[in-house]
Amino acid sequence: MLYSELHRLAKRELARRGVPVSLGATTLLHQAYIEMAGKERTSFPDQSRFMGYAARVMRGLIIDHARSRRAQKRGGQFEITSLETEIESAANGPELVRIGEALDELSKADPSLSEIVDLKFFCGFTFAEIGAMKGISERTAQRQWEKARIYLHRKIRADLEI
Amino acid sequence: MRTLSPDRWQQISPYLDQVLALPEAERTAWVESFRAEKPELAKLLQELLEEHSSLAQKGFLERSPIPGTNQSSLVGQKIGAYTLMSPIGEGGMGSVWLAERSDGRFERQVAVKFLRFSVASQGGTERFKREGMILGQLAHPHIAELIDAGVTPNGEPYLVLEHVEGEHIDDYCDHRRLGVDARIRLFLDVLSAVAHAHANLIVHRDLKPSNVLVRNDGQVKLLDFGIAKLLAPHGNPTATLLTQEAGGALTPQFAAPEQLTGGAVTTATDVYALGGLLYLLLTGQHPTGSGQHSPADLVKAIAETEAPGASECFMSTQSSAIAAMRGTTAEKLRRELRGDLDTILAKTLKKLPAERYTSVTTLAEDLHRYLKHEPIQARPDRFTYRTAKFVRRNRVAVTLGILAVIGALAAILMVERAARRAEYRFQQVRKLAHAVLFDLNPEIEQLGGSTKARELLVRTSLEYLDSLANEGSSDPALQVELATAYEKIGDVQGNSKYSNLGHPEAALESYGKAVAIARKVGPSPDALEILANTYSDIGTVQVMQLGLRSAGRENLRLATSIADSIPKLTGKPEYKL
């Protein structure tokens, strides 16, 4: 239920490209939360847990999206949509997939850090927002993000060197 | 490069935390000193730090992976008379870009802030531009100038602002280890800016550290004046902050209670937020505490819970770190905050707007007085005054209110018990019983239909009094108070002389306790007075309510004779019941 709802919203979001300033994933998630809270009052008692879960879903959606784009390219299909004519997103497809793998690893070593990456990188929440959600200071959120980033980078580099 | 094993990560993680918390300039020295302790870990730490700075420089993982939100496509785009150059930041409200004039007329760079909401209708666009104009007329050295406001062809509103390079005020103070007085002086600059805006009838509505920047040269600059109002949904002035910001940031730590409950937003709202800011600057904490908060808890804390006195913040383990950033020790800092600063903060952080400082200027005046060691105008709250006010204000929710008061006092009691400071605890209980009986009861009496609340009041008071009686203190003054309290309880329970709960037997029991305690004290005037009064009460209840005429007459007679004996026994002038 939640997944399909998020999926719907994400699709809409992804289709919005071309607008100078897009609404962004945070708006999307807040919106999802408000809609979900209305429908399923009981299953998600607080916003912070909701966001943690939703951000994980978001990560999955984005990485799947990147994967499918890659698959399309490999299949040599003609690009009908304007997807590829858009300026390539900062993290390209293959890199995104690797980031996803590294994150799976991190979520085993330090789950709270991987959640911060989901919220920050995949959803675009600010440190202040993340801090408020997780009951930590803005600075602590930033520090944890910096730590997670070091971890992920190490992991990705190590994988590439093998 | 080796990947980090989970074990290795667990090992290095806390040190990484410590070193990343330091200002960049101090990190190398820290690692050096750590090297003597744990050479191997220090080596890894050094490596990770180097990796960190290269990642920060490259902006690794900093751009959104979602196509379309990737804003590099905006570079070079013209917004009004300005050309976007590079993104500065992404906030709850929207994204911010560095820009310069397209026609090259001015060298000055500006910040263009896109607001993350749409002004769909033509009317909305007009209103946005109009209000933007008003804000643009706000000229003050400590307010970042609003240069222009407009709406893109896509319907996205934007603001063109003076570009300010600086740190959030709390970071600025911490990084420079400013002491309490220096922090207050800087805060006074903030106040002068807010006072200027208020004089122009503009309320900020969203004062928080990230909106108060301090430049390298020490100049304070306030951002986003009045913008929260621009964002308020048109035609829905009562929307609360939470609903307003549902699409954006949810960081209501600095919001005033009335912003969460949908009350009127006035200059007093800014006074509250300023109180929160000063609290943070002085104690390193939010007035709502620093623990885990769900949004619901936070709302509750802001709307209902009184903030702990600023000087009471230094019990945690982080105290010495917080104090160190203020160039002092936790104990000294606590002493500095206790008294006037506690009082000033409490007055700015009042739940009711009318009880706060009447203006930013009066707050500033008190802070100036504090700096000059002159007596401040704000008065500390007396407990009983506060409690009585509370009841008066909350006629409807009186039962709930009483519960809250008793709950708060019970909490004090628990803390005291834990500390095993018997004497202090005794005083607390005494205060409680006194407040409940002498201050709360008369208030409740006037409410009418509040039997439930009074029942609860009596039951709770009796529990405390009984526990107090069992302490067996030898202080005669306390014992007299205790007896008086029992006597009062008896009146509430069932003395027809007063509005009562209709339990005469229970009343007699309480009167009995009063007598027993007063008798033990011996023939002091105070003890005899209470004894005489209580016997008189007993007699009254027996005669009037229970029909026990002879017993009643006996007790009334006893009361008179005790009263008559007071002058003779104690040298006190004649005593009449």
Image (cartoon, coloured by chain):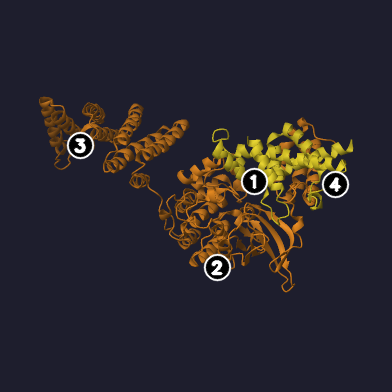
Q: Quadrant of the N terminus of chain B?
A: top right
- Quadrant of residue B31 in the image? top right
Colour of chain B, in one word, is orange
Circle 2: element type: helix
Q: Secondary structure at mark 1?
A: helix
Q: How many marks?
A: 4
Q: Label 2 to label 3, Cα distance in Å?
A: 69 Å
**Which residue bears the numbered disc 2?**
B134
Mark 2 and mark 3 lie on one chain; the one further toward the N terminus is 2
Q: Work out whether residue B347 can be spotted.
A: yes
Chain letter of the yellow region: A
The type of residue carrying mark 2 is: Ile
Q: Sort mark 4 into few (<14), some (14-19) or many (20+) by Cα contacts within 10 Å.
A: few
For disc 1, the marked residue is A28
Q: Which mark is residue A78?
A: 4
Q: In the image, which is nearer the foreground, mark 4 or mark 1?
A: 4
Q: Nearer the viewer, mark 4 or mark 3?
A: 4
